[in-house]
C-alpha cells in the first residue's frame, strides 16, 4: 500500500513542484510505482510533464467536486512508473464550492483510498497556502516533506505551517509526521546559504529529520519544465539530477525503518 506524502510549504518559490516532479521520476527509475497529484491551481506539475493542462476536462478539480472518480482521472506521463492526476486553473474555485460540503476535509483522502494498493508512493504537490486544498492534502497524507529554500527569510512562516499541521492532526484526528526537511536552492559558496543551512538545523534540532541531500541552485532544474520534462530526463548528469537521485535513495532507505 502506498505511502501518501504531501510536499508542503505555504511559501512559493521553494521548489515544491520541482521536488514533486523530479523525486517522483527518480523513484520510478528505481522501480517504484508513483502517482503524483497536482493539487495546485497553477498546474505547474502537470506542465512539467509536457501535458497541455488547459485542454483537460478531467482534473483534480472534477474529482474534488464529485464529477469524476480519482481512478478515472489518472493519466500517463510518458514516464514508466509515474502516473499523474492533473490540474488547471479550474481548481482555483474549488475552495468556495467545497466549503459548504459536509465532510469536505476528507474528500481527497476518501478518493485516494481507492488507488493506494496500486502504488508505492503517492505524492501531493500542495499549493502555497494554508487553505482548504492544503487541509485536504494534510488529512490525506501519511507524512510531509517540507522544502525550505536557502534564502533570507527561509524560516518565516514555518511556525504557522507546523501549527496548522498540528491543528489538522488534533481536530481532524489525522496526524501527518514530518518525513523530512529538504534544503533547496542551496549554494554552498555563499555565506547566506551556509547560514540558512545552520539556522534550519538549529530550528529543528534533532526533533525532525533533515535530509542529508540538499538541492542545489541549478539552471537545468529551471529550464527543464519549459521542455516538458523532469530535469532527471532533460539532463541526466547535471547537479540537480544527481541531487534528486540521491534524495530518492534516502527515501528508499526509509522504507524498512
Image (tube, rainbow, N blue to C red):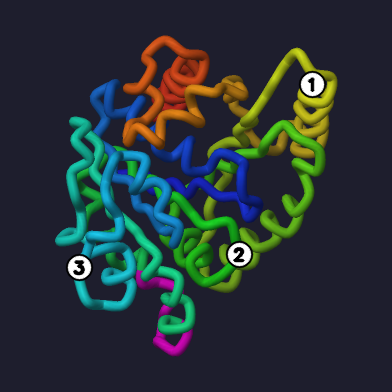
Name the image quarter holding the C terminus: top left
Callout 1: 10 Å neighbours few (<14), some, many (20+)?
some
Taking the magenta stretch, the answer to whether it contains residue 14 is no
- Report, in whole angstroms, how far the alpha carbon at label 2 lies from the one at label 1: 29 Å
Q: Nearer the viewer, residue 255 or 94?
A: 94
The answer to whether 178 appears left or right of 86 in the picture is: right
The answer to whether 217 appears left or right of 225 in the picture is: right
Q: Is residue 142 visible?
A: no
Say if 172 sits above or below 75 in the image.
below
Which residue appears at 26% of the width and 77% of the height? 66
Local secondary structure at mark 1: helix
Kindly identify which residue carries mark 3.
69
Report the number of numbered marks. Answer: 3
The answer to whether 191 appears left or right of 9 in the picture is: right
Local secondary structure at mark 3: loop
Q: Position of residue 91 (x, y in %)?
A: 40, 69
Which residue appears at 53% of the width and 53% of the height? 176
- Report, in whole angstroms, how far the alpha carbon at label 3 lies from the one at label 2: 25 Å
Kindly identify which residue carries mark 1.
194
Which residue appears at 27% of the width and 30% of the height? 32
Amino acid at each position: 500500500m502506498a505511502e501518501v506524502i504531501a510536499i508542503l510549504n505555504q511559501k512559493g518559490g521553494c521548489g515544491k513542484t520541482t521536488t514533486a516532479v523530479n523525486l517522483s521520476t527518480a523513484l520510478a527509475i528505481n522501480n517504484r510505482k508513483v502517482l503524483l497529484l497536482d493539487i495546485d491551481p497553477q498546474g505547474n506539475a502537470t506542465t512539467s510533464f509536457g501535458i497541455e493542462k488547459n485542454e483537460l476536462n478531467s482534473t483534480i478539480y472534477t474529482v474534488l467536486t464529485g464529477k469524476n472518480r480519482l481512478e478515472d482521472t489518472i493519466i500517463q506521463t510518458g514516464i514508466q512508473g509515474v502516473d499523474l492526476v492533473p490540474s488547471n486553473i479550474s481548481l482555483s474555485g474549488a475552495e468556495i464550492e467545497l466549503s459548504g460540503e459536509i465532510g469536505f476535509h476528507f474528500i481527497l483522502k476518501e478518493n485516494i483510498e481507492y488507488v493506494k494498493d496500486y502504488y508505492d508512493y503517492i505524492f501531493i504537490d500542495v499549493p502555497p497556502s494554508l487553505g482548504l486544498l492544503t487541509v485536504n492534502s494534510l488529512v490525506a497524507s501519511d507524512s510531509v516533506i517540507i522544502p525550505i529554500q536557502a534564502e533570507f527569510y527561509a524560516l518565516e512562516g514555518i511556525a504557522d505551517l507546523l501549527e496548522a499541521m498540528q491543528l489538522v492532526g488534533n481536530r481532524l484526528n489525522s496526524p501527518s509526521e514530518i518525513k523530512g526537511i529538504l534544503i533547496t536552492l542551496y549554494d554552498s559558496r555563499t555565506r547566506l546559504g551556509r547560514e540558512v543551512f545552520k539556522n534550519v538545523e538549529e530550528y529543528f534540532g534533532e526533533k525532525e529529520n533533515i535530509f542529508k541531500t540538499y538541492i542545489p541552485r541549478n539552471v537545468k532544474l529551471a529550464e527543464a519544465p519549459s521542455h516538458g520534462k523532469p530535469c532527471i530526463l532533460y539532463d541526466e548528469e547535471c547537479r540537480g539530477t544527481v541531487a534528486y537521485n540521491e534524495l530518492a535513495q534516502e527515501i528508499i532507505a526509509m522504507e524498512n525503518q
